[in-house]
Amino acid sequence: MENKRMSKNEDFWFRIAAVCGILTPIIAFTCISTAIALYPPFSWTDNALSDLGVVEGAVSMIFNGGLMLSGILALAFAIGVQNYLNKSVMWKIGAFLFALDAIALIAIGAFPEGTAPHYPASLAFFVLFPLAMLFIGAVLMKKNEKPMTVFSFLAAIFSIAVWVFQYTVGFGKGVAIPETLTSLAVSAWALVLGFKMLKQQRKQ
């Protein structure tokens, strides 16, 4: 990591951002899993995850609330990611795309299925992540951070591949499976980089 030594205040907020990256997938999948458990009719092959956001009662509240909270945490994480390699324009572009991805996640929860902004927000979420990974992976490759380079590129390729499979072979008529697989790629990347950021700060 090429990064100037941070002040105590900058160090504090950088650590907060890293923790947010770790918490984001934990909260997101806890809420999604809880919503699915509370709604037995949900089908992995026939439904979209967003279908949970329009079920009356606790299911939609947990699902939509979880997405919005996760998106807010992911946005805070994205700010920290931007400062992780603060001399690279391409890195900042990648971090900015990741921040837009977090905003899209907030919008998915704020505007449930059936509202006009929902589809554009969902599309943005699944398109922006692999784009962000391509920019970030390219920078990491130049910095000779091989494990994270490979991981970032694999996350991008995997996220694209599951949707190509969905619209060629198909997991089912619903999109819950490719949505979940892409979200797992996002989550794994956020967890790994979040811990890496914390580890880096401990060395300073």
Image (cartoon, rainbow, N blue to C red):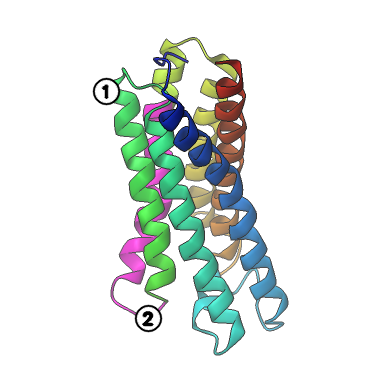
- Depth check, front residue: 145 or 80: 80
- The location of residue 161, given as percent across then percent down, is 52, 43
| Label 1 close to label 2 by CB (< 8 Å) | no
- Is residue 133 in view? no
- Specify the amino acid type for callout 1: Val
- The location of residue 21, given as percent across then percent down, is 54, 43
Q: Is residue 28 left or right of residue 101?
A: right
Q: Is residue 152 magenta?
A: no
142 in relation to 75, above or below? above
Magenta: predominant secondary structure element? Answer: helix
Count residues near mark 1 (Cα–Cα under 10 Å), then give few for <14, some for 14-19, many for 20+: few
Count residues near mark 2 (Cα–Cα under 10 Å), then give few for <14, some for 14-19, many for 20+: few
Q: Is residue 135 magenta?
A: yes
Circle nearer the N terminus (1, 2): 1
The mark found on residue 89 in the picture is: 1
93 in relation to 164, above or below? above
